[in-house]
Image (cartoon, helix red, strand yellow):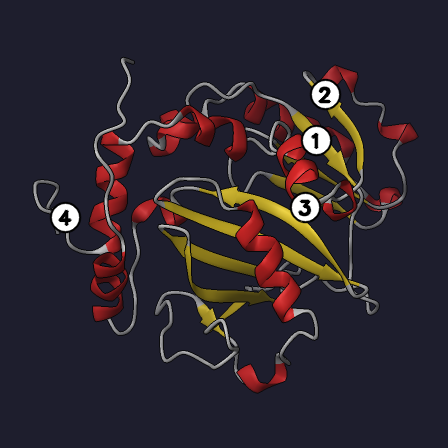
Amino acid sequence: MRPNLDSPKTLSEKIQWLKLNYHNPLMTTLGDKYTVRPYVAERIGEEHLIPLIGVYDSVSEIDFDALPEKFILKASHGSGWNIICKDKRAFDVEKAKQKLALWLDTNFYDCTFEWQYKDMKPRILCETLLERPDGKAMHDHKILFLNGIPQHIQVIVGREKGRKPANAFFSTDWELLPIRYPYQAQVARPASIPKPKQLETLLDLAQKLVPNVPVVRVDLYIHEEKIYFGELTFTPRNGYFVWEPAEYDRTLGDRLELPEEYAEAG
C-alpha cells in the first residue's frame, strides 16, 4: 500500500515523511557506531560503552592474529553489518575480509534511503564480545521513544548462529503487550524473560541518551548486572512496520508529533 505522505497518520508513514523532510545532522553523528561513543560517554559515562579493541578504515589494517579469541566486528556506517567470532581457531578470516571489504565499499543510504547514513565515513569496529554466562547471546533491549517519551521495550532473545531470534514487547512497567511482528518469531513463554532488576536504571540511561529528535530507538544490553550501550536508531525498521494487530501502527502514529521541515540541500 502506498504511504500517505501528504497527511501521514501511522508511524510507518510518519517515518517515511521524516526520511524525506527531516535531515538533522545530529542523526548522522549519533547513528554512526563510532562517532556516537563520545556522546554516550558524556551523557551516561564511558563504563557503559562496550570496550573497543580497534577501529579500521580498511581491511588491510586489521591484524587478525592480534585479536582475542572472541570478538565482534561491526561496520560503523550501517545496520546489521556484524561478524561474531566465538572461536578464532574456527574463524574464516578470508570470508570475513570479503564481507568487510564489501561493507566498506557500500553506502548504506543507497540500500535503504535512510538519510542519516548518507555521509557517514565507512569504518570497521572491533569490540569485546559480551555473552551470557552460558555463552549465549545477551538479551537485546530496544526502547522506542517518540518525541522523547518511551513507548515500549522490545526484547530480542536467541540471537545465535543458525537460530532465528525471538521477540517480545513490554510496557515500561514490564507488562507484556499484546503486539507482535507476525513475520518474526515470538518468545514462546514471555514469562521466561524476567523483569530486569535494573529496569529503572535501564530506562533512566535510555532517557539520558535521547537527543532532541522526533523518533529514536535506544538499544541497550545487560551483561553481568551492568548495562551497556548498543546503538541509536532513528528510523527503526526503516519505517516499514507490520504489526499484529495492525492498529498499533496508527496508535504509535497518533503519539508522534511531526516537526517543521528540517531538510537541507543534498
Looking at the rendered image, the disc whose residue lies closer to the viewer, 1 or 4, is 4
- The percent coordinates of residue 131 (x first, y second) are 78, 59
Q: Earlier in the sequence, mark 3 or mark 2?
A: 3
Q: Earlier in the sequence, mark 1 or mark 3?
A: 3
Marks 2 and 4 in Cβ contact (< 8 Å): no
Task: Describe the element under mark 4 as helix, strand or loop.
Answer: loop
Decide if residue 163 is on the left or right side of residue 125. left
Looking at the rendered image, the disc whose residue lies closer to the viewer, 1 or 3, is 3
Looking at the rendered image, the disc whose residue lies closer to the viewer, 3 or 4, is 3
Whole-number angstrom distance, CA of label 2 to CA of label 4: 41 Å
Residue at screen point 21% across, 34% down:
260
Residue 87 visible at all? yes
Please tell me which residue lies in front, 81 or 16: 16
Is residue 113 placed above or below 247 in the rendered structure? above
- The percent coordinates of residue 103 (x first, y second) are 56, 26
Q: Earlier in the sequence, mark 2 or mark 4?
A: 4
Residue at screen point 23% across, 30% down:
21
Residue 44 badge: 3
The amino acid beneath tag 2 is Tyr
Furthest-left residue in view?
6
Whole-number angstrom distance, CA of label 2 to CA of label 1: 6 Å
- The percent coordinates of residue 152 (x first, y second) are 44, 66
Whole-number angstrom distance, CA of label 3 to CA of label 4: 35 Å
Marks 2 and 1 in Cβ contact (< 8 Å): yes
Q: Residues within 10 Å of mark 1 (few under 14, many from 20)?
A: some
The residue under label 4 is 8
Residue at screen point 55% across, 30% down:
32
Is residue 239 placed above or below 105 in the rendered structure? below
The residue under label 2 is 56
Q: Earlier in the sequence, mark 3 or mark 4?
A: 4
Looking at the rendered image, the disc whose residue lies closer to the viewer, 2 or 4, is 4
